[in-house]
Amino acid sequence: MTTAIADPVLEVHDLTVTYRQKPALWDIDFGIPQGVLVGVVGPNGAGKSTLIKAIMDLVPTASGYANCFGQSLDEVRQRVSYVPQRESVDWDFPASALDVVLMGRYGKRGLFRRLSNRDRRVARECLRTVGLEAFADRQIAQLSGGQQQRVFLARALAQEADLYLMDEPFAGVDAATERTTLELLGELRDQGKTIVVVHHDLQTAAEYFDWIVLLNTRLVAYGPKAEVFTPELLQETYGGSLTLLANVSELARKQNLPVRE
Amino acid sequence: MIGSDAFWIVLTGALVAVASGLLGSFLLLRRMALIGDAISHAVLPGIVLAFLFSGNLHSLPTVLGAAAVGLLSTIGIEALHRRGGLPGDASMGLVFTFLFAVGVIGVSSLGGNADLDQECVLYGELAFIGFEERLLGMPTSTTILLANLLLVLGVLGVGYRGLFLTTFDAGYAAAIGISTAFWHYLLMGLVSVTTVVSFEAVGAILVVAFLIGPAAIGHLLTDKLPWLLTWAAVSGVFASLGGYALAALLDANVAGAMTAVLGFEFLLAFLFGPYGWSTWRRRRPQTGLEKLRPLGAPVKP
Ligand SMILES: Nc1ncnc2c1ncn2[C@@H]1O[C@H](COP(=O)(O)OP(=O)(O)O)[C@@H](O)[C@H]1O
Ligand SMILES: [Mg+2]
């Protein structure tokens, strides 16, 4: 189930991550070409967040590495934008939406140089893109969960990157946010950007993404969704939950995807 | 000279309160309020050691040596937690009580030494600040605390964005290549230095109140960081003024009275502040779960 990728934008090689001797990711190997929208799918605790964090160099790796644009992350950080899980920060923090989006400019500007007018313009532009221009000066504690998620998206956009790694941007958001986010991801893809999205909802995964990475500590499969979104592979990813299996065949049928024997 | 004594006491108390209030605001936001407690106890053996070497509490080596012990204690706490696998609160409790005990042994065995006795170490001697030798025209402690406040203001001014970002979202900060460890230990270093230079004025125990109190008050009054810092500083200055008045009235320990006033200010802020008691329910995060019907509860028609 591996596809050889020429000139991958993201390449993960032999990656193993352990938390206190317990593997969270085991020997992961895959590549992602430019200009695709990729869903990373797997059950809870499958190591999806860990995969993103390992690519971003945020957790120590036991072996292996990840490359972006054929270089180590340190060489190309400006071109890689990371959207952490929304729950990873305290939204009671005394900051405004604009404050948070401006953080997306810190990487370019450095911490000690003043932010320019262009930085502020870009930040406001990004807030508009996610439909929050009216909320720029609103304190983030007063935003809804979906709006907070969109603030995170706007911050990632403000970085003007080429590769986006997003951890569960669809988790617990309202319908408006889900629609905005999806449209935005499509536009980014059409501009030639590469987007990797951790997603836990099987129902929508095949609909939203071009490519799928199936993960459960080990890499189960990756590739164009038509090749990967099959009952067998989904079963291998999710294990033997009966109700789920019933759903899986149905899902595959609904998506008009090939059901292989 | 009573009037000028009062002036030095209030000024010195305010210098302690403002510096620790500003640093405490960041500690509070990082959910590390108790690390201030840990550091303030851990510096004690450093102070004793440095005192033994230099025979003087006011020398730069004393301050830096003691602050270094404070900083080392935070590194030790991290290491026990990260590498030793001990829960964070346990490793903190272990490290600081141990170091404090070493310090207490040191102080008590130095016994009758006039410059370093238990009373002064635990409760401070703000009341006698006016009798200190002058340095640059002010009592030595006051001058040192002023220099410390300028240092804190300078670092916070230059490093505001770094602290802001690494406090709010350390993961994103690391992802764009910022060293979160640098900013963590920079803050810990400032807290250590501030604790060391403050302990003589307000004592090792009450400095914790100054690290947490003004910041907590600020938190109840605003949801903007610049204003939080401002309110922390203002409430610190008021605590110093009010504490002096209270101490004069009751003929009590000045630092203790300042802490009591700080507690009173906190109560007022909690009862009447825009982010205090009145909004406590509203500010709780909405998870959506509260709308769910409890298991077994009847379905409403
Ligand atoms: N910081 C951590 N310390 C110890 N174990 C962790 C840590 N983070 C994640 N894990 C464990 O690693 C596994 C993978 O976690 P994660 O990557 O968050 O999964 P997912 O995002 O797919 O739900 C889980 O078993 C989780 O409990
Ligand atoms: Mg996750």
Image: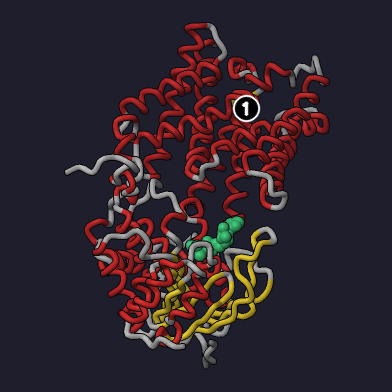
Q: Between residues B193 and A99, which one lies in front from this camera angle?
A: A99
Q: Amino acid at mark 1?
A: Ser
> A233 above or below B199?
below
- Mark 1 belongs to chain: B
User: Which residue is more in the foreground, A38 or A164?
Assistant: A38
Name the residue located 49 percent from the left edge and 16 percent from the top edge.
Answer: B244
The answer to whether residue B258 is left or right of residue B43 is left
**Which quadrant of the figure has residue A218?**
bottom right
Q: Is mark 1 within 8 Å of ligand 1?
A: no
Q: Is residue B92 above or below residue A63?
A: above
For the point 63% across and 75% down, the residue is A15
Locate residue A183 relative to residue B206 in the image: left or right: left
Q: B114 and A36: which one is in front?
A: A36
**Image quadrant assignment for residue A145:** bottom left
Asked whether residue A116 appears in the rendered view, the answer is no
Q: Which residue is mark 1?
A: B141
Judged from the image, the secondary structure of the residue bearing numbered disc 1 is: helix
Could you say where residue A248 lies in the image, as x and y percent from the top left? 40, 74
Can residue A211 be seen here? The reply is: yes
Look at the picture and state if A205 lies above or below B35: below
Q: Position of residue B297 (x, y in %)?
A: 29, 40
